[in-house]
Image: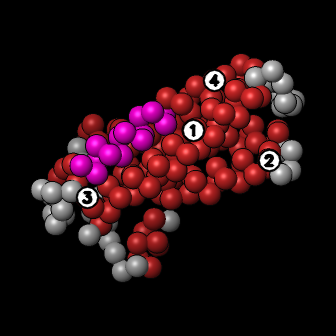
């Protein structure tokens, strides 16, 4: 999918499959997250939201494992060395991205864990709902920042 988006703009990527997979997920995660939140906010579809968030969490876990496997095995710098920004903007963009990505991962894991612990299979509002709503908002905002900063890094390192 990512290649179609890049081709649309006349770009190509030097990134390996694991990095392309995570970049593709980052392209889709924010709209999917908004649909899931909208299902609860406007449709009161708590169970749909529960399944959707669990699925997003599992897909994120698989994408992150593939990404980490790729990065730890081969590294990413070899693919980014031909970037015209390799010596200037790539590392600051990566650090900026990690300032979003690491806290987002922790918050999302906490929200999912506490949701599984505090909500039954018949998802309904309860004692934990207000905390869940606040943490979920933070997680959604942070995921938006993670996706945007990840795309910035991806473009600077692998596309231009």
- How far apart in space, not on screen, are marks 1 and 3 (Cα)? 26 Å
Which is nearer the N-term, disc 4 or disc 3? 4
Tag 1: Cα neighbours inside 10 Å, few (<14), some, or many (≥20)? many
Q: Which residue is mark 1?
A: 139
Compare marks 1 and 3 and give the one earlier in the sequence. Answer: 1
Alpha carbon distance from label 4 to label 2? 21 Å
Taking the image as shown, residue 100 lies to the left or right of residue 128, namely left
Do the numbered discs 1 and 4 sit on residues whose CB atoms are within 8 Å? no
Residue bounds of the magenta highlight: 92-105
**What residue did someone put label 4 on?**
113
Q: In the figure, residue 17 lies in which quadrant?
A: bottom left
In the visual, does 49 lie left or right of 141? right
Residue placed at 32% from the left, 46% from the top? 96
Q: Which mark is residue 157?
A: 3
Chain-order first, disc 1 or disc 4 = 4
Question: Under tag 2, what secondary structure?
Answer: helix
Gap between marks 3 and 2, in whole Å? 38 Å
Q: Report the front residue among 44 and 56.
A: 44
Is residue 59 in sight in this rendering?
Answer: no
> Does the magenta run of residues contain 18?
no
Magenta span main SS: helix
Mark 4 residue crowding within 10 angstroms, few (<14) / some (14–19) / many (20+): few
């Amino acid at each position: 999918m990512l290649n179609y988006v890049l081709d649309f703009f006349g770009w190509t990527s030097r990134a390996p499959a694991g990095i392309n997979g995570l970049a593709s997920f980052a392209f889709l995660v924010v709209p999917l997250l908004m649909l899931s939140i909208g299902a609860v906010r406007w449709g009161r579809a708590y169970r749909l939201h529960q399944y959707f968030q669990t699925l997003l969490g599992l897909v994120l876990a698989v994408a992150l494992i593939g990404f980490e496997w790729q990065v730890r095995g081969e590294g990413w710098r070899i693919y980014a060395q031909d970037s015209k920004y390799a010596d200037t903007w790539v590392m600051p963009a990566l650090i900026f991205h990690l300032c979003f990505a690491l806290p987002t991962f922790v918050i999302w894991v906490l929200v999912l864990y506490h949701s599984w612990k505090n909500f039954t299979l018949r998802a309904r509002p309860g004692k934990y709902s207000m905390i869940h709503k606040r943490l979920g908002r933070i997680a959604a905002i942070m995921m938006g920042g993670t996706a945007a900063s990840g795309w910035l890094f991806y473009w600077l390192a692998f596309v231009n």
